[in-house]
Amino acid sequence: MDALNITNGDIILEFIYLLSALFFVAGLKLLSNPESARRGNLWAATGMIMAMIATMILHRDGHGNSIQGGNLVIILVAIAFGGVIGAVIARRIKMTAMPQLVSFFNATGGAASALVALIEYSNPENQSAIVTILGLVIGSIAFSGSMIAYGKLNGNIRDIFVKWMTYVNLVILASVIFLIIFILTSGMPAESKQILVYVLLAIALIYGVSFVMPIGGADMPVVISLLNSLTGIAAAMGGFIYQNQAMILGGIFVGAAGMILTILMCRAMNRSLINVIIGAFGGGGAAVDREKGVVKEISATDLAVMLNYSSRVVIVPGYGLAVAQAQHTCSELDQLLEANGVEVKYAIHPVAGRMPGHMNVLLAEADVPYEKLIEMDEINPDMPKTDVAVVIGANDVVNPAALDDPSSPIYGMPIIKVHEAKNVIVMKRGMGKGYAAIENYLFYADNTRMFFGSAKDSLQKLVNEIKAL
Amino acid sequence: MESILQFFYTNKEAIFIIALTIFLGLEVISNVPSVLHTPLMSGANAISGVIIIGGIILVGHADLANLGDASNLVNLILGIFALLFGTLNVIGGFVVTDRMLEMFKKKKK
């Protein structure tokens, strides 16, 4: 581009890219506040559309040629096609399928980055082999990893964890890094290198699969957020290829934002990112065998009375609520209780569910006002004043072993201190253990009563009982 | 090694931008209430679809007169797929984020 005369069009295009980049930043900033979030999303979308249209009209290649009519038609048709499919999926899908949908869209972004890098690698005018290769690798890992995450969240793929997979993963990762360095530094002819690039692509795709495969359960939010960050970085690599500031800035910005969210999630579990990726859960073993006590059940009628005559109730939702799709019944219970003068709040643990903020979206779908959703640190001090804490389909995030049992694998993880409430009700399907596969002494505590059954049935029974009071 | 140093030099402006952008990203995202984690992630995800610009450039400058050349044709087809995937990411991402935020909004009394 430097060798050519710079036209007004070039200047305007760069200016629009600058504007788009600013729109992205402002959009994400607005997205971080509930009041302005929707506007923020619109801003970011506007920035994107501006950059797309400007590129179509004003972009010139290294020889100064603009985009011709025939090419433009292909572009518009492809965009219209992809846009309609994307919009229809996004509009139609059930709100409960949100985690897998976010994963799916993330996969498409990774695929696009990998494809762009693959094509550009064979372009002799592209001088930046390093970023092209990195874009290819990161985009491919983000794609296949997100597809596996999609499959897991959608229930098509089970969590598979075997110890040796950790080592296999390390070997695959090492060969990816080795191949990258080899391709970049060796002086072998371009044709042979091209073949190695295909090999690299294949191994990167395999790595995405094998690295997400063993991760599951409560670690899902971390992985989803990490994959999101990778897609951003892959897009930024594409930006380097074209020296396009809007792409670089947008990509890196998303990469950094995704990374901080990933770290926040890890911190919420008191684990390091490495620990999550390698998967250190399950090895806990020698936990102290404490006095268990007896499990005490409660009947629907007793529970209905108890809740109805409380003044403060805190509901602690977990993945079980999402699985049973019981959010509407939960909201109905909440409204019934509120109508009878009971104050109902929700305590949200940062890693409850399968993606960051999962419970918030789930409850929002059931019309629970977001002011009632209280974050862990804010609600914990109020726990001793709470009459009944109702745990629905959550386990590890309310396990007091995290506070007082140094031998427990989850020791040090911040939890919602339901055990400090006057009464604790745990709704569970059975006495099974949570994702971390550790005993929860909360279930045997003196102030705990168990209410067995699937979350939806249990809540429905409860609603009927309260109506009958 | 030399190629890496060369890369740093030729891309020095971009690397400055990256360094500053990382800080900006951290700054903008820290202290986000967990209520907004999902929409934020989904919105950011849509922005990473900015790779679509690359798709537009690729397909836009593809040599349509010379499609008999196999590699040319393959590149055009791959480019169209990149565009399709990129659009799915961008449009789907923004629309689904808007839908989530709409849910948060409508309960405001």
Image: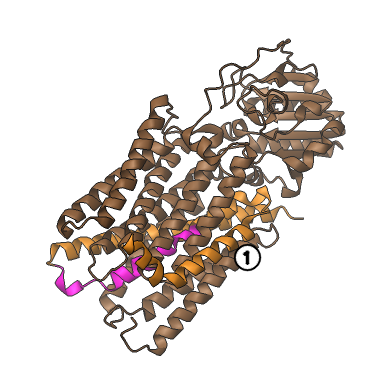
Above or below, comparing residue A373 to residue A283 in the picture: below
**Along the line of sight, which residue is nearer the eye, B37 or A88?**
B37
**Drawn colour of chain B?**
orange
The segment highlighted magenta reads B46-67
Lateral position of residue B75 relative to residue A397, left or right: left
Q: Residue at x 33, y 55 (%)?
A: A136
Report if residue B66 lies within the magenta region.
Answer: yes
Viewport quadrant of the C terminus of chain A: top right
Q: For mark 1, give the secondary structure.
A: helix
- Residue A84 seen in the current view: no
Q: Position of residue A427 (x, y in %)?
A: 68, 24
Q: Which chain letter matches label 1?
A: A
Q: Which chain is brown?
A: A
Lateral position of residue A224 relative to residue A402, left or right: left
Q: Residue at x 22, y 68 (%)?
A: A124
**Along the line of sight, which residue is nearer the eye, A47 or A329?**
A47
Q: Which residue is mark 1?
A: A39
**Along the line of sight, which residue is nearer the eye, B30 or B99?**
B30
Above or below, comparing residue B84 to residue A242 in the picture: above
Q: Which scheme is used to colour this image of the protein? A: by chain
- Residue A18 seen in the current view: yes
**Along the line of sight, which residue is nearer the eye, A392 or A176?**
A176
Q: Position of residue A193 (x, y in %)?
A: 20, 55
